Amino acid sequence: MTLARRSALLSGARLLLGGSVAALASACSRAGAATPVAKEHFEVEMSDEAWKAKLSPQAYAVLRHEGTEVPFTSPLNDEHRKGTFVCAGCALALFSSQTKFDSGTGWPSFWQPLPNAVNQRVDNSLGMSRDEVHCRRCGGHLGHVFDDGPKPTGLRYCMNGVAMAFTPA
């Protein structure tokens, strides 16, 4: 087999594999999503139609259907002013800018939420067990928390930027 033929076959295989992985990730994200938040009760509750009208399509997919934004796309990654990160669904204050750090993951990350701001539950989607973080007041999905963060907590609250808004101090 010639080098050109081998190179062409390898490029085709990479393209096929890349498309298959993306399709599998998308299917797993939809089929293996955590239990919908609608089964729980929260202080702020709206119909699905009202959430769709209130939120952008991306925020709706993340907050109400536990989607994930594409990494490195959130403007909140580059937000370094003093202030508060609030829920895009109900405006509850979630994180202080003082706890934000660059985790290198592509999502806004924090080492600690504000008191009484978030709740957690086990998310067994994608064939693994993770701790999902959601807004205490409206139940909106924010992201996940991991134990590989910086001191003083050692936690990394890896949040979807589209699920939050920033309020400068």
Image (cartoon, grey):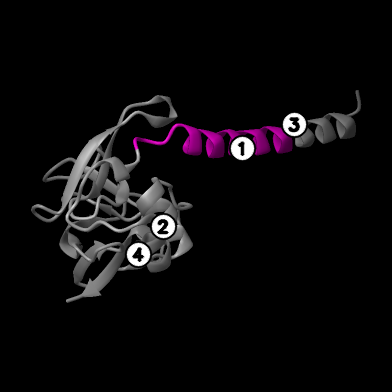
Which residue, given by chain and number where applicable, does mark 3 sit on?
13
Do the numbered discs 2 and 1 sit on residues whose CB atoms are within 8 Å? no
Label 1: how many residues lie within 10 Å, few (<14), some (14-19) or many (20+)? few
| Of marks 3 and 2, the one in the foreground | 2
Magenta-highlighted residues: 14-35
Residue, disc 1: 23
Measure the C-alpha gap from mark 3 to mark 4: 36 Å
Mark 4 lies on residue: 76
Question: Looking at the image, is mark 1 or mark 4 nearer the viewer?
Answer: 1
Which residue occupies 48% across, 52% down?
Answer: 70
- Where residue 50 sits in the image (x, y, percent)? 37, 63
Q: Amino acid at mark 1?
A: Ala
N-term-proximal mark, 2 vs 4: 2
Mark drawn on residue 60: 2
Q: CA distance from mark 2 to mark 4?
A: 17 Å
Instruction: Give the CA separation, mark 3 to mark 1.
Output: 15 Å
**Is 22 or 147 nearer to us in this picture?**
22
- Sooner in the amino-acid sequence: mark 3 or mark 2: 3
Look at the numbered disc 4 and give the secondary structure of its residue: helix
